[in-house]
Structures are given as structure tokens and as C-alpha cells.
Image (spheres, rainbow, N blue to C red):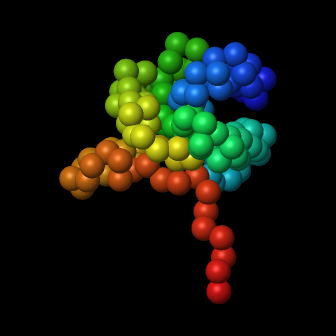
Amino acid sequence: VHIVTSAVLRQSMLPAKNGKIINIGSRAGKVGYPSNSQYCASKFALEGLTAALAEELRDKGIQVNSYAPGLVNTRSFPKPEGRKGVRSAESIEDGFFTVLEGGVTGHYLHADELDEAREKGFEDSAALKPIGEAIFSP
């Protein structure tokens, strides 16, 4: 991820002073899941990279965010028929465009939370959350 991102930044986005990077995250990058420590570690690292790049590139016209599409049924990684929460590849499109067109940097969106925001009548942008947490201030 870092090698490809760095190459695209150097060769295209930085010279153009424009661009959008959307890393594909996972709730596993926010919450540890038993028996998935390596996957969780890689997704936590991706969230850290996303947050750091968002700060580094904030004033250079480049937005960096992450999108967690949830469980997606694909030919490469099929999910059991009828499993709760499984999405089709087509169903994650709205979330992708919410991130792409959100006009923010350093944010995270999970497809399930977008669905929940919509069910409650909120704007899609309500489901976009800052990746970084607030620093403790007594």
C-alpha cells in the first residue's frame, strides 16, 4: 500500500496539487477480533497510515480517507448464502461515493454506519467520522 501510494503521489498527485486516496479499511482496523490478530494489525496500520497521510497532505490539495465496505460477497472470497450483513459488490458503491465526494480528509466510513445514518434520516456525511481520536485534555 505504501509503495504504490508513494509512487502515485510523487508522479501524479503532488505535481498536480490535487487528488483523492481512499484506502479500503475494515472494522477490524478499529476493533480487535479474536483469531484475527494479523488481519486486525494490518487494518489498524492502514488506519494509521491514512490518518498520517491525511495530515501530511492536508495543505497540498490531496484528501486521504478510508472506507470499510463490510462483508462483501465476491467470486474471490465468497460468503455463505444468507449470512447476515453480507453485501453485494454493487451495494458498496454509495459508500464509496460518499467518501469520494465528501470533501473531507482524515475520515473513515463503514458501510453499515452509512445504512444506519440513512435509516435515521441523517445526511450521508453524518456517517463520516474522523480517524484520529481526541487527545486527552483534563
Q: Furthest-left residue in view?
A: 121
Q: What's the residue at 58%, 52% (across, down)?
A: 131
Please give left or right for residue 59 compared with residue 79 in the image. Answer: right
Q: Quadrant of the N terminus?
A: top right
Which residue is at a point 60% across and 67% down the rendered structure image?
Answer: 134
x and y percent of residue 37 in the render? 76, 45
Q: Residue furthest top?
A: 75
**Residue at left 48%, top 28%?**
72
Quarter holding residue 62: top right
Q: Is residue 87 visible?
A: no
> Is 12 in front, or is 105?
12
Tell me the quadrant of the picture where the C terminus can be found.
Answer: bottom right
Q: Residue furthest bottom?
A: 138
Relative to residue 72, is residue 126 depicted above or below? below
Whole-percent x and y of residue 52? 70, 46
Q: Position of residue 38 (x, y in %)?
A: 78, 40
- 26 lies left or right of 33: left
Q: Position of residue 51 (x, y in %)?
A: 65, 47
Count of numbered labels shown in the rendering: 0
Q: Which of 1/9 is in front?
A: 9
Q: Residue at x 42, y 40 (%)?
A: 103
Quick check: 78 left or right of 99?
right
In the depicted structure, whether residue 132 falls above or below residue 83:
below
The reply to whether residue 96 is visible in this rendering is yes
